Amino acid sequence: MEQEDKKKALLEVKMFLATIVLLAILIAVSGICSYVIPAGEYVKTSINSGMQEVYHTIGQTPLPVWKIALAPLLVLGSKNGPRIIVLILFIFIIGGSFSIMNKSGILPRLISDLVMKFADRKRMFIFINVIVFALLGSTMGILEEVTPLILIFIPLAYQMKWDSIVGVAIPFVSVTIGFSAATFNPFTLGTAQKLADVPLFSGLYLRVPILIVTILIVALYILWYIRRIEKNPEKSYVYGSDMEIKALTHYDDVVLHQGKIKPALIWMGICFLGIIATVAVCSTVKALQDLSFPLIALIFLIMGFSVGMASGYEFKKVFKLFKDGLIDFSPAIILILMASSVGWLIVEGNIMATMMHFVSLKTQGLSRELAAIIMYLFQLFMNFLVSSGSGQAMLTIPIMSQLGDILGLTRQITVLAFQLGDGFSHAFWPTNPLLMVVIGLAGIKYKDWFRFMLPLQVILAITSIIFLLIAVKINYS
């Protein structure tokens, strides 16, 4: 057993270092850009009795080497620092709590029950979950909150003879496409429409079809991948690493639990899940948005210790299981800090405004259709630099909405270009801290995730452009 633990640790280190190298390269490139790209800023200026954002060049602000090197630490002092710290604490608490529930046998039994229930209805299982998670993202803006479920869906996917990519794709990709194809998402759609002076949650007659089409695309894509690896498991993008993980964790030797879970534990789980769902719904209220993450983490903490104690373990044993979970999840903290620092360096180098100004110059004089596509592609690139949807909206919408007015595009089209460019790539860009944490939990190398996601991203990009052209054609408002 000790030898197997060492092999497993070595495998995890190899996957972790591969991701670290990729993020280190992106950090270095972001720092170098501050030496190459001219610095600038947008300043509110009174024009024709109204206030507009006007671009101004400023003195070059190249970032010193020490600042680039220490960016993963310095980012904690930025305006996004509190959000990053909350995410780190959230990951720690979730990891510790799930360690308790896993070692106490509750999670294995839950997974076994699900496998037995859907053993002959795997396609239905996929469609139900994709629809449910997409609706959660589209209506309530839920995204980070699905992170704990990765720890359930990975072993579930293994027992259904799929792979770790499917285990991540079902909850995470589904909720991400719903988050992007927003209907009532308060964090992205709500923020963008407010900044663009568009009626809140208006334009549903086009957004609902976009949501339906994207749900269908993602469900069919996952089903295509599942059929592929069911016919030939070696076609899995993570076949080699999954085989090693299964061998070291004895996934193939798991016997489905036939025993019943104590009724008290079932009711306890239902109550906690109900409380978590209530908090997630309440997080759509602006005054409660900042509290949702800490509250969900606190609930999971209480649930983990309660389940451990109810399972018959002493408090000392439960605390040890929690501590083991903290250790297992600690590498995720480095990924969060490194991924977050890429966008921070771009802002610190004062080149973000220059990039936006460049796009505004290049789109002037173009047809409305081509201008809308370029605005979409710009937002897609911006999502590489700024992973926060609401943060990206506050940064770009004030300028992009003015540009849209000049180009003859409605404010609703500008919001749609932001919405489609912002969301789908959350599950693709390596600068998204949440994505790196999720695939890190699953033991998936980014290059393997990239291979899986690239065709889907291309399909979603083409779909987005088609809907944007429709929006321009009907003068979407």
Image (cartoon, rainbow, N blue to C red):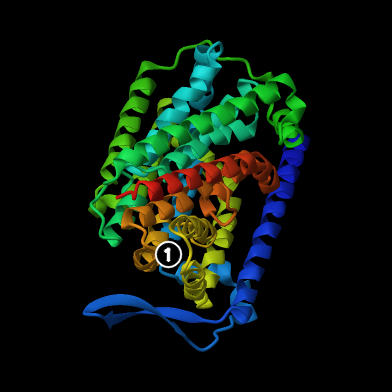
Residue found at x 51% / y 89%: 59
Q: Residue at x 59, y 39 (%)?
A: 456
Is residue 386 depicted above or below 210 in this figure?
Answer: below
* Label 1 packing within 10 angstroms: few (<14), some (14-19), many (20+): some
The x, y position of residue 134, in whole percent, is 42, 35
Q: Who is closer to the viewer here, 103 or 357?
A: 357
Q: Is residue 245 left or right of residue 312?
A: right
User: Which amino acid type is shown beneath numbered disc 1?
Assistant: Asn
Q: Is residue 360 visible?
A: yes
Quadrant of the image containing the N terminus: top right
Number of residue marks:
1
Query: Quadrant location of residue 175?
Result: top left
In this view, the residue in front, 379 or 360, is 360
Q: Position of residue 186 (x, y in %)?
A: 31, 49
Relative to 137, 113 lies left or right: right
Residue that mark 1 sits on: 80
- Classify residue 203 as left or right of residue 115: left
Name the residue nearer the viewer: 434 or 271. Answer: 434
Label 1, secondary structure: give it: loop
Q: Residue furthest bottom?
A: 59
Does the image show residue 317?
A: no
Among the 4 quarters of the image, the one containing residue 41: bottom left
